[in-house]
Structures are given as structure tokens and as C-alpha cells.
Image (tube, rainbow, N blue to C red):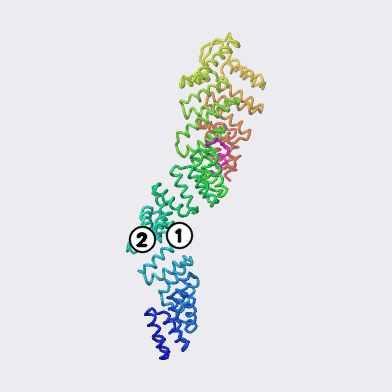
Amino acid sequence: MSAQAYMSAEVNALYQQACSAEYQNNIPDAIEKLKQAISMEGNDSLLYTKLAGIYSDIGDYDKALEAYQKAIELKPDDAFIYISVGSIYETQGKFNEAFQAYSKAMEIFPEYKYNYLNIANAQYQMRDYKNAVITYGRFLEVYPQHWDARENLAAAYLALNMPEKAVKEYTTLYNKNSSKFKNLANYGIALVKVGEYAKGAEILEKAIENDSENTSCHVSLALAYQELGNNDLALEQYNIVFKQLPNLHSIRLDYANLLADMKKNPEALEQYKIYIANYPNDIRAYKNSAIVYKRMNNLDLAIENYEKTLTIKPDDLDVKKDLASCYHQKKNYIQALKYYDEILKVEPDDIDTKTNKAIALHALDRFEDAIILYEEVLAVKDNPTVETNLIKAIISEGFVYLNANNYSKSVEYFQKAITKDSANDYAYYGLAKAYRGLEINEKAGEMYEKAIALNPEKTLYSNEYGEFIAALYNQNTEVADDLPEISLSDDGQLVNNNPDLLKKNKDLILLGDENYRKKDYEEALKNYQSALDINPSDEVTLLKMGNIYKLKNDNKNAAEFYKRSIVVKPDYTDGWFNLGLVYANENNITEAKNSFNRVIEADPQYAYAYYALAIAAETEKNKTEALKNYKLFLQYNKDLANVSQVQDRIKSLEK
């Protein structure tokens, strides 16, 4: 009304005639009347605005924009002219220009909150979804019940991959009036994205009833069926999708996964190949292909695909675990170990990997390393299979030392195996052979007999035992036909009452002792060895032999006889102590400490074992341990010779 106040009567009449003609849908006459009015009074923006509106209604947007531009020149602060201009641009798909026009209107007239909807719609069409969400929010603060705005907001959330928020908006609208609800497709897609597969499938089925050509609906419905385990229905939907869009390769990974789940392995692999050709850097396709190949027992192609995955993502631990498993199955234990080690660098407490690594080491005859890992696993978790493997590895290591003629060490391993499994016939068999190598024949025979008793059907044991007895008989008849038969007690002592044999054994030891005092060590060794030929289980004479070799700085032979003495008598403290001294001489502090600790286990008051441990601790710069052992030495020591020296060491360490 205020705009018309400036019109002359004649111009106003023409304006009214134009409005009447427009109402009667006589558009040409309306345009003509307005042009006449403009020719008479061209400075009235209302005339241009009316003309622009008519041009816009008939789709002549260029003329409409031209008229609006003239109106803006005459009345630049009219926000609604800009809104009309924005509407035309939006209709033309010129969303950036529409946004500029709507923004100008907001700048002029910020109180007009409804314009937020125009701006938000333009932002949405420009794919500026983040700002569209913000602007829709501002609009809905004023008009919270606006249906279209909420639908558009939900669509923006979905475009931003915020399906939870999209579902919230769509659910509110759907529950409010399901018959009015139009965005079934987006709602169903959003539901599938948030994992509501059953509800999503229900909505998508309705959407497809309305629009069977909506490929996105078919894709999401296929995924929903797939997640629900309705594989046949999922397959049907994928077939529809590829019929509609044969080159829609982005979903072939999911399609291939479905085929793999349905055990259609060749078909799945074909789809993985197509997907990889189009998306060569997606590691999921290589991983899943490898899984299928592994299931088909084609380990070479499984390995090829796993290794391709690692070229793209070198730190993928799951792939390394699968790859190690494939190499392990191929019995390529070297390659398997490479990956087991890489896994354990990152996950040092992975029990399964430790177990598998131990098995691989075991298979490579690296028994000692396998034993360490088996024991680490069992320290964390009981596992009967691992326990069995550990015992086998211990026995195998015992045979390694047996074959190397290191009989004392082999005895340690076989005894350890028997401690863990007292019914293991093979461990007793190995122990028999080790005792035989040490010439402790009585114990060798005993171990043969135990092995045979545990497994009488094992002819190896009985045959070898028979050979052993025959060899002993031949040896006795050839070397000592004149000597009566003797026997040994369980602790290795002579038990027969033959005075000649007893006297000969004692005389040889006494003669050896005499030569030892004279420092005629070679003769002493001969005497002691002759005594041992009669009674090889005499731990004291074995110790004396070790002592002579120790004096001669022959640590190897010294250690061998000390070990034989503790094989004969496992809690023989002097044997363990002197063995510890040999290890200390060789600077093998760990084994030295182990030996001294075995002394204390057998005799907690063995003072010099504490003294030796204190010296070892000082070597390792462990003051606390050294002090503790020096003080224990003083507590149990009965020899005053070293007391003052030890007291001085304690004072020095406590400074």
C-alpha cells in the first residue's frame, strides 16, 4: 500500500488492471499493462517486482531476474526482493547464487527467521552439509514443528555420515505421521548404517515398493539381509543392484563377502578380483581373499594376498598372525618365526603367538629355545598340550647332548622330563643310555628296566637292554674273569661282602689319596679310575678326580667329573660347590650361582656357598645381594680364617 502511494492515478489504474489480468490468467495482458505503467513511471520498484514475479511464474527466469535487478536498484534494502531472486536461482540449480541472494536478505532483515530455511536449503544443495545443519538448527529453534526442515536436517546428518542423528530425526517424523513420511529410503539407509538391520530392512522394503528403481535402497537392503543372516535374500538384492548398475564396483567387496559366507569360494574370489582391480589399495579385499584361499588350502595364494596387504599396511598384526599361520602350516618354520618375532615385539605377552613360536622352534630342533617359551607359556596358563610338548622338547634336548657324548648334561634333561612325567618311558630309556655313557651301569640297567616296564611292547628297549647286559658280561669275563659278581645299593654303594673286591676298591682309593698328597696327580688319577671301574657310582672318588683336573686347570674334565658325582648323588653338596667354582673360573656367573644355590637347597648351613654367592654378587655389582650373603656366611661359618676379611668387605660395602 505504501508503494502505491507514489503512483499517479493513471499508473495505479494500469497496475490494478495488470493484477486483474494475472488473476484471470491473462499473462500477456498483465505483462503489457505493467510495461505501460513502467514507461510512464519507471522509478517505482513495485512495478518491476510485480513484473518479475509474473515472469518467474511463467518460467521466463532471465526476464524475471532482469526485472528484479531493476527493482533492487530502485529499492536496495528490500530483503524480500533478494529472497525472490534466490528462489529463481535455486530453481535454476544455481545454488551458490541463491545462497548469496538469501544471505543478502538476511543481512538486510535479520529478524526474518524464516529465511534460515532458504539459506539452509541452498547450503544443502551446495553440499555444505556442516553449515546446513547449523542453519537448519537456527530455523528449527523458531519453527520446531516444521516437517520439511526436519527431513532436510536428517538428510544433512546422513550426508555428513552422522546416521545416529539422522535416525533420531527420521524416527520422530515417522512415528508422528507415517502416512505423511516421504523419506523412507533415507530412513532405511540410516537405520542400516547404525546397525538396526531388522527395522532398516522393514523400512527399505516399503521404500522399494514405492520406488523399485532406487538402487541405493537395494544396496542397503542387501547389507541388512546379509547382517541378519538372510543370505539368499541378500544375494537376490545384489543381483538386482548389478542388473541396474553393472559397474557399481564399490559394493563388490560386500558382495564377495556374502559369497564367501555362503561357501561359494570361486565366485567370491572372482568378485574380490574385480573389486581389487578398481580399488587396488583396499587391504580388506586382499585379507578376505587370503582367508578364502586358506580355507581352500591354497596356502601359496593366501600368503601372496596377505603379503600384498602388508605392502599397503606394514604394521597390521592380525595379518602377520595369519601369515605366520600359513607359513607354519606349510612347515616353512623359518618364515613363520620371522612373523612370530615381529608380533611379539609389539605384543610380548601374546600367549598364542608364544606357543606357536615354541612349536616352530621345536620343529626346527631348537629345543632349548622352545623349552624356554613353553615354560613361559605354562607360567601364565595351564595347557596340557603345551606341557606335553615341553616334555618332548626336554627329552629331545637330552638326546642332543647324549649324541654329543655330554652324558652328564643329558642326564639333567632326562631327569627333568621324568620329574614332569614320571611315566614317560622314553625319558627313562634316554636316561639309561646316558648312565651307560657315564659307565654307571647299575643305574643304566635300572632305567632300562623302568622303560621296559612302562612300555613292554617297545622292542627297542628290551633289545637294547639285552645287548647292554651281554656287553657287560663280555666285559667282565674278558677283563676280570677272576672277580666275583658284585651289586650296588640304590645310593650306589657296594653291598656285597666279598672281602677281596672290597679290599681292592679301598686299596686303590688309599693309593690314589697317597699319590694325591705327593702331588703325583697322574698316578692318583689312574688309581681313582681303577677304583671307579669297580664302583662307578662312588661320588667321593668322582669328586677327587674332578679336584685333580681342577688343580691341573682342566676345567672341562673337572666339570665332567663333578657332574658325574651329582648325577650319582643329586644332593651331593661338595659336587655342586666344586662345579660352581669351575663355572666361576670360566666367568660363567649365572651357572656358578645356580650351582651354589643348589648347595644351599641341599644344606642351608653350607657357609662357603654363601661366600661364593657374595663374591658372584660383587662381580655383578649387586651390593645388596653381596651383603646379605656375606652376613649369612658369618652366621654359619665355623672357620675363623676368613672372618676378618669378610667383615672388612661388609664394612666397605656398607659405606
Residue 314 lies, with reference to residue 160, above or below; the image says: above
For the residue pair 405 and 339, the one nearer the viewer reads as: 339
Determine the CA span between mark 1 and mark 2.
17 Å
The amino acid type of the residue labelled 1 equals Asn
First in sequence: mark 1 vs mark 2: 1
- Label 1: which residue? 161
Location of residue 194 in the rendering, given as x and y in whole percent from the top left corner: 41, 56
Q: Which residue does the image show at 47% across and 42% down from the upper left?
A: 265
- Label 2: which residue? 171
Q: Which residue does the image show at 63% across and 33% down from the upper left?
A: 586
- Which quadrant of the view contains residue 118? bottom left
The reply to whether residue 226 is visible in this rendering is no
The reply to whether residue 538 is visible in this rendering is yes
- Is 625 colored magenta in this rendering? no
Location of residue 130 in the rendering, given as x and y in whole percent from the top left corner: 47, 65
The amino acid type of the residue labelled 2 equals Thr
Q: Main secondary structure of the magenta part?
A: helix
Residue 537 lies, with reference to residue 192, above or below; the image says: above
Q: Which residues are magenta?
A: 329-343
What kind of element bears circle 1?
A: loop
Location of residue 476 in the rendering, given as x and y in whole percent from the top left corner: 57, 12
- Which quadrant of the view contains residue 196? bottom left
